[in-house]
Image: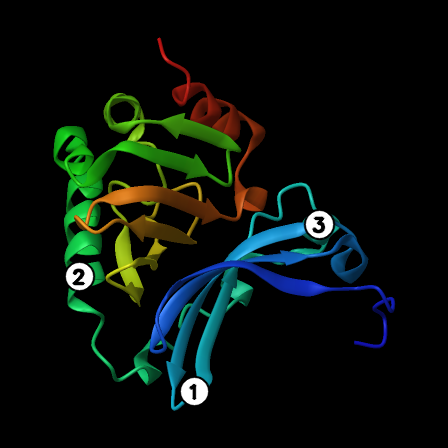
Amino acid sequence: MASWDADAKSYPLRIIGDEHSAVMFFEDTPTMFGSELRGISALDMENGKVIRQVDYWDGRRAPLASTRLPLDHYPSDFKESIVQRAPDPVIRDIVNRLHAALSKGNSSGAAQLFDVDAVWEDRTTRTILDGRLAIERYLARASSSLPYGAGATIRHMVGSAQGGGYEWIGGPRAAARHGMTALKLNEDRLITLISPLWDASYASDDTMTVLVGLTLEP
């Protein structure tokens, strides 16, 4: 774009998936949008070309947050229907089981999907939880408050047996209407890394304080 400086860069940090679909962790340097953006993209490919890409990031403190419009000004259809290929069966099974557990507040059921040394990396609240047991305790406290928990629905899945993720739609009272959760799997098909990400620029300070507080052990 003409407004970007010559040193403006956008580049991938990590890609999880295969030649059909994947999640991509990316970095946009501050000179692009006035603040550093680290986000996650859902990618679908056909014949070596990307046919759908949806980027997710948290714009709560970025300068762009001040220019946001009401939610009803944005499309609710993210064109996931153009993807004809069925999701990889491994990632589909993991996502469906994880989503079912989170939506029902079943922390022990969700925890069974994680490796004992799994890492929960919440890219919106900027918190990290280490280990399956800590993750289970966190979900017992927080699942009813998470925007991808109770009332959420799955929008679209991407990835392979190595991992990937899913786009989700938050419930009517959720802190976010849209978001992305990236997953990395091991050979035992257990989650070793989970990275939820959503735009908190529409959430109040009180809501964010509650969500961050839920990450703390009582």
Closer to viewer: mark 3 or mark 2 = 2
Q: Quadrant of the N terminus?
A: bottom right
Location of residue 48 in the rendering, given as x and y in whole percent from the top left corner: 43, 87
Q: Is residue 71 left or right of residue 95?
A: right
* Residues at discs 3 and 2 in contact (Cβ within 8 Å): no
Task: Name the residue located 31 percent from the left edge and 80 percent from the top edge.
Answer: 81
Tag 2 residue: 90
Compare marks 1 and 2 and give the one earlier in the sequence.
Answer: 1
Identify the secondary structure beneath mark 3: loop
Occupied quadrant, residue 19:
bottom left
* Residues at discs 1 and 2 in contact (Cβ within 8 Å): no
Tell me the CA gap for discs 3 and 2: 34 Å
80 in relation to 206, above or below? below
Identify the secondary structure beneath mark 1: loop
Q: Amino acid at mark 2?
A: Val
Structural crowding at the residue carrying mark 2, measured as other residues with C-alpha within 10 Å and reported as few (<14), some (14–19) or many (≥20): some
Identify the secondary structure beneath mark 2: helix
Tell me the CA gap for discs 1 and 2: 22 Å
Tag 3 residue: 36
Task: Name the residue located 31 percent from the left edge and 65 percent from the top edge.
Answer: 159
| Residue at the outermost top position | 218
The foreground one among 71 and 28 is: 28
Structural crowding at the residue carrying mark 3, measured as other residues with C-alpha within 10 Å and reported as few (<14), some (14–19) or many (≥20): some
Compare marks 3 and 1 and give the one earlier in the sequence.
Answer: 3
